[in-house]
Amino acid sequence: MHSYIQSQGIQLQFASALLNTDGSVPRGIVAEAGLSPARRFAIHRTNVVTGLAEALASAFPITANIVGAEFLTGMARLFVVEAPPLSPALLDYGEDFPDFVEQFPQAAELPYLADVMRLELARRKAYHAADATPLKGADLAGYDAESFARSSARLHPSVTILSSDHPIVTLFAMNAGEEPLAPIEEWNAQDALIVRPFLSVHVHLLPPGGAVFLHALVSGATFADAAMLASTETPAFSLTENLAGLVSTGALLAIDHENNSAS
């Protein structure tokens, strides 16, 4: 047990030193003839940080198109040192990277950048979400209006709803090659729906009030209550448009009838 604890302590010390920018070398590091222990460890430290930074930056190809791969990797290096991964599995690493970029002084002229990165994270999450078959329009044919209003919804497991003060759906589409690059004449807030109903991940622009409506459904509200909340917050909200979008995007997984008992 003592040797195990000692080994764990050495590993923790080694890992801590790898991300220490003061150039310190963990105790017990030796080197054969040639480079000094400090120099050999510095090379290893550089390789580790560079590898983690490049792996992290690779998860944000749209962001790289906006700021350039070199600038993105540079930010990633600083983030890795400040917030190293806590698990050898890097799939979920970097969820706090947009928050870091949001406060990064050199990115202050691009206030939308962090939200674009959050959209990219949502796409990665959707890609790895569980498979599920969404409802089709024909599946709703048997509902009368009153019964439907008292029902609640379950959304597809890949769904993320993202709101931004910036036109992130347009920015994403332009930098993903889905729309031509052009000046954005009306710089308006946009809400995005990210979903993978089948094989491909899709990013959809939500209509007015759509984010409020979907968040309410996620929280367990009935369709009627969710629509009322969205209408209150956004007078331009259209229930018909939002229901059509909910089905056509593949975001609607199931309808729950728990609220269907007439009161």
Image (cartoon, rainbow, N blue to C red):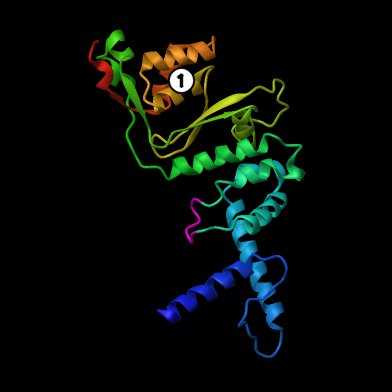
Q: Residue at 52% of width from left, 18% of height from top?
A: 207
Main secondary structure of the magenta stretch: loop
Between 143 and 172, the one nearer to me in the picture: 143
Q: Residue at 54% of width from left, 42% of height from top?
A: 121
Relative to residue 204, is residue 18 depicted above or below? below
Q: Position of residue 20 (x, y in %)?
A: 67, 66
The residue singled out by tag 1 in the image is 213
* Residue 89 lies in the magenta-colored region: yes
Would residue 41 appear left or right of 59 to someone viewing this image?
right
- Image quadrant holding the C terminus, namely top left
* Residue 129 lies in the magenta-colored region: no
The magenta stretch is 87-92
Q: Is residue 211 visible?
A: yes
Q: Residue at 44% of width from left, 81% of height from top?
A: 3
Q: Position of residue 163 (x, y in %)?
A: 56, 28
**Residue found farthest to the front:** 2
